[in-house]
Image (cartoon, rainbow, N blue to C red):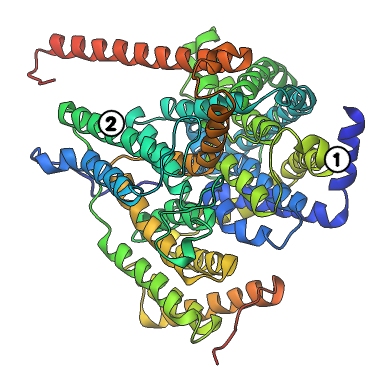
Amino acid sequence: METLEGEKPETGRKIWRQVISGAVLIAFSVAILVTSWNYSTGSLQQMGPGYMPHVIAYALILMGLGIIVADLRDTSPHYAEPMHWRALIFVSAAVLVFVALIEPAGLVPAMFCAVAASKLANKRSSLLSIVIYSAAVTLAGYLLFIVALGLPLTVFGR
Amino acid sequence: MIDQFLLGLSVVLQPEVLMYAFFGVFLGQVIGVLPGVGAITAISLLLPVTFYLDPTSSVILLAGIYYGSQYGGAIASILLNLPGTPSSVVTCLEGYPLARSGRAGFALLITALSSFVGSMIGVVVVVLAAIPMAAFALKFGAPEYTMLVALGLVAASLISSGSQLRAFSMALVGIALGMVGSDASTGQYRFVATDALADGISLVSLAMGLFGLSEIIRNAANSEARKSKIQLSFKDIFPSKAELRSLVAPVGRGATIGSFFGALPGTGAAIASFMSYAFERRVSRTPEKFGKGHLPGLCAPEASNNAAAQTSFIPTLTLGVPGDAVMALIIGALILNGIIPGPRLIVDEPELFWGVIASFFVGNIILLIINIPLIGIWVRLLSIPYYRLYPAIVLLICVGVYSHRSSVTDVVLTLVFGLIGYIMKRYRFEPAPVLLGFVLGPMLEENFRRTMLLYGGDFSVFVTRPISAVLVGCGALLLGFTLLSAFISHRRALKAKHQQGGSYSV
C-alpha cells in the first residue's frame, strides 16, 4: 500500500543523494573485509572460512561502484515520500520498550506498554483510545500466547 | 502417483492437520484482503509458531497462507482498485471497471472460479511433475546444485521489477548475512559480534524486520479509512453458459503460463499474472476491449497467478531450492523443524511431501467454499483502517521473535533490520532478494566448496557435466536476453528524447 499523497520530486540534484546507495554498499563490503581479514582463506581446492566472505565482499564492492555509476548517469526524477519520522520513532520505541520490560516485568506489562507506544505512531490517538485499545490487544495477546499457544513466557515479572 | 496422492490425502484428512490447512487458507484469504499485510509478513509472523507444530502441519499452514492470499488479493483489486498482493495488480485493470459498471458480485465470483480452476491445474502439474523431478534431482551433484542456486539468485535479480544491479547486490548482502555464525565445514565462528549471534542471524528476525516492521513504519501514519464506493449487489452474479464457455480457453492459457513461470526459479505469481495478461491481449481478436472490464483479461491472470502459486512448490519440495522469498521462508520452516529439504524428501518423508501436495487440493476447495458465501465478511475486513491494525502486528512481531529463541538480541536485531529495510526501500533497494540470498547463501557456499574440493579447483566441471552445462546455458541466455532488452529500451528512450528535442544528459 503506497500513498501518493505528500510525495514530492527530489529537487536539486544533490550529489550525495546520488552516490550514497553505492557508497553504503561499499562501506558494508569493506566492513566485511576488515572483519574477515584474519579468517584463513585457504586455496581454491581447500577453501577456508574466509574464502567466500572475501569473494562476496569484492563482488559487492564491484556492485557498489556499478550502482554509483548508474545513479550518476540516471537523470529520471525519482519520487521519494517524506520520511515517516513519527512512525519511525514510536515503532522503534515500542520494540525497545518491549525489550526492556519482557524479562524484568513479564509479558503482560511489556505487551501493554509496547502497544501503547506503537499507537502513538499515528496522530489519531487520544489518551483514552490508547488505554482502551492497548488493554484490549493485551488481553487478546494473553489469550493467544499464554492460553491458546501455551508459550513458556513469564506473564508477570518476579 | 495416484497411490502417493491418496497417501497424502489420508494425511490431510486427519482432523488436526485439516484444521491447520483450514486455518492456513483462511488466514491467507484474510491477509490477502487486509491492507498493508502481505503473505511474507504473515508467514514470517507464524514461523515461530510452527516450532510447536509437527513439520507437516507447519508447511501445510504456511503454504495455505501463501496460496490463500492469492484469492484474497483479488477482492481488494476489484472493489477498491488497490491490489491486495503484488500478483493481483493486473486484476485491477479489468476487475475494477467491471465492478464500477455494477457487476462487482459477478466479477468476484468469476475471479474465485478462475482462481480455483487455475490452482487445480497447478496442483495437477505439481502431482505429475513431483516424482520425475525428484528422480531427476537425485542425479544432481555438488556442481549442479552450485549452478542451480547461482541461477536462482541471478534469475531473481534479473527478473526483478527495479534495477537489476540493485537486486543482485541485495542478494549478495543476503548471502553475507547468511554467513554469520559458525562455518559449516570448519566450525570456525564468523562475524559473531556477540554470543547471541553464535547460531547465526535468525531467519525470523530478518524476515519480520525487513518485511514486517519496515512496512509498519511506512504506513503507520496513514489515517485514512478505505471505503469502497462500489455497491455490492448479488443480482445476476452467475455467468451464463455462453460466458463460461468463452472463458475456458483464457483460463487454460493463463494456468499454463502460470504453471510454467511458477516452477522457474526467480519468477513467481506476480510475473505470471503480468505475462498472462499481456499474452491474452496479444491473442485477443478484440484487444480494444481490454481495460474496460473484459472478462478474459480478468480470468487469465487470476488463473495464472494461482497456478504459479502452486507450481512454485515444485523446485522447493523436490530440489530444496526456493525460487522466491516466500519459498525461502517455507524452506526455513522445514530447516527449523529439523528436516533437510532436497531430493531425498520425497523418499524419506513421503507423508510430509504428499501431505503438503494433497493439502493444496483440499485447501483450494476450502477457499472456493469460503470465498463467495463469506463475501460480506471480506468486504468488512477491507474497510479496517491500517491504524487499528498495526499496533497488534508490532506486538505479534515482538512476541513472535522473542518466543522463538527467548533472545532479547533477536528482537533488537529485528528492529535494526526494520530500520534498514525502511531506508533501503527509500533508496530503491528491494528486500526480497536479501531473504532469498540469506537462505540460498549457505547452500551456495557449501556446494561450491564441495565442488572445488572434489574436482581440484577446476571450473570446467561446470560446463563439462551435462546438467550443469544446461543450467549455465540458461543463465547465459537469461543474461543475454536482459542485456539485449535493456539495450533496446535504452535506444528507444534516446530516440524519443531526440524527437522531443528536449535537452538531456546521459
* Left or right: B495 as drawn, with respect to B414: left
Classify 10 Å Cα crowding around label 1: few (below 14), some (14-19), many (20 and above): many
User: Which residue is at 45% across, 68% downward?
Assistant: B409
Quadrant in the rendering for residue A69:
top left
Could you say where residue A92 lies in the image, as x and y percent from the top left?
35, 67
Position of residue B177 relative to residue B405, above or below, is above
Could you say where residue B41 lies in the image, as x and y percent from the top left?
52, 52
Position of residue A111 relative to residue B425, above or below, is below
For disc 2, the marked residue is A62
User: Which residue is at 77% across, 49% downward?
Assistant: B56
For disc 1, the marked residue is B8
User: Can see residue B1?
Assistant: yes
Q: Amino acid at mark 1?
A: Gly
Q: Nearer the viewer, residue A139 or B489?
A: B489
* Left or right: B163 as drawn, with respect to B86: left
Q: Secondary structure at mark 2?
A: helix
Q: Nearer the viewer, residue A85 or A104?
A: A104
Q: Nearer the viewer, residue B216 or A31?
A: A31
Please identify the quadrant where the C terminus of chain B is shown: top left
Name the chain under label 2.
A
Position of residue B70 relative to residue B401, above or below, is above
Could you say where residue B434 lies in the image, as x and y percent from the top left?
44, 42
Which label sits in the foreground, 1 or 2?
A: 2
Q: In whole angstroms, how far apart are the C-alphas of marks 1 and 2? A: 48 Å
Q: Secondary structure at mark 1?
A: helix
Q: Amino acid at mark 2?
A: Leu
Name the chain under label 1.
B
* Left or right: B260 as drawn, with respect to B138: left
